[in-house]
Amino acid sequence: MIPSFHNIHSQFRWNGQKHAVDSLLTLANEYLLIDNDYRQSIGVFIKDWFDESPTITLNTSGSTGTPKAITIAKKSMVASAIATGDFFRLQPGMTALLCLPANYIGGKMMLVRAWLLGLELTEINPNQDPLSASEAVFDFCAMTPHQLSNSLKNLSQIKTLLVGGAPVSETLCKKIKASTARVYETYGMTETVSHIAVRLLNGQANNNFFQTLPNVILSEDSRGCLVVHASQISTAPIVTNDLVRLHSPTSFEWLGRVDRVVNSGGIKLIPEQIERALASLFTQRFFVAGLPDPQYGQKLVLVVEGNSAEQSITSLKQESSLPTIQLPKEVFVVAKFLETPSGKINRLAVLESLC
């Protein structure tokens, strides 16, 4: 039986203190008075969660377009929290670290998991290197790839780490291979109530396949995009714009976004695959995309953040393993990338600034 969203596990602790609904609401009111956006977002979420409405309004991150507000049933978030607990065998009394902002689904779900599953939650202000603020060891944590990259020296403080919000680069994967922490890349979005699948990035069992959480079945549509069937989260199938290679009804390989595919002279190029192949050649942020071309319809371009590009088209030909057709035809340098409200590269805005 799925518990009510008003339930709080008897073993739940927040920064060492036991809480019931009343004391959490008191904490929320205190946080709303603090001049700190992070604390205020937690306060707002607590009050929204424990009101009488069976739904809650969440904001998407805007990584693939304009951020939007969507309505999610609280029972769906409860089901997601339980599925994560079952998959990772989270037990009451285990320790968890909250270092993501509560503005978006990742931070919100860490809170929901903690009070429903009886975790002992430690909350710290989100920053680039969250583990620098504590010497404690945590059973469970979620971070962005950027936070992970800055936490490598202290990664032994985490036993199980979820990484989401953006793809994890091959370069970063190599840096965590020998870590004692079990690091999982997550697949999901606000519409799927956080992650519905994960893949292990290190250890002997690591591979390129995402494995679904309990009670999630997958299929593809006519475009080759992933369709998620998860009745406890959504009554209707969730159709994504993610191109995948489906290996079974519960596992898949993520290829890229269908709305980012570049059609150059009839050849369809997937930017995310090309970016993965080029990642080891850059220390700056970069991306590849399509721009209008009178001869081919679209041409593949490389956009690099900084004052100068470390690579030229000639050096890319020499140093990368990409076939000629997948090499960018032009390089643009942008001093500072425009970003979405959640801190991701706003590719559309950057490309518009080039035209």
Image (cartoon, grey):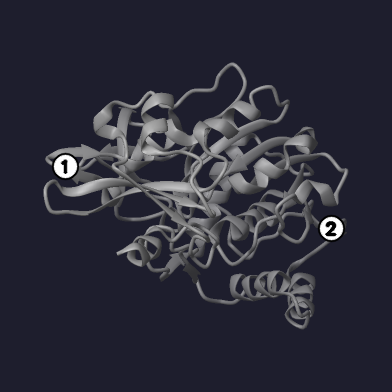
Residue occupied by mark 2: 15
Say if residue 251 shows up in the picture.
Answer: no
| Picture layout, residue 226 above or below residue 325 | below
Residue nearer the viewer, 36 or 139: 36
* Residue 135 image point, x, y percent: 88, 43
Left or right of 116, for residue 125? right
Name which quarter of the figure residue 141 lies in.
Answer: top right
Please identify the residue farthest to the top as the structure is shown.
204
**Amino acid type, callout 2:** Asn
The image quadrant where one finds the C terminus is: bottom left
| Picture layout, residue 213 above or below residue 354 | above
Left or right of 170, for residue 275? left
Left or right of 12, for residue 353? left
* Residue 258 image point, x, y percent: 27, 47
Secondary structure category for the residue under label 2: loop
Query: How many angstroms separate mark 1 from mark 2 (CA)?
Result: 48 Å
| Picture layout, residue 44 above or below residue 166 | below
Residue occupied by mark 1: 222
Closer to the camera: disc 1 or disc 2?
1
Name which quarter of the figure residue 248 lies in.
Answer: top left
* Residue 236 image point, x, y percent: 30, 55
Q: Residues within 10 Å of mark 1 (few under 14, many from 20)?
A: few
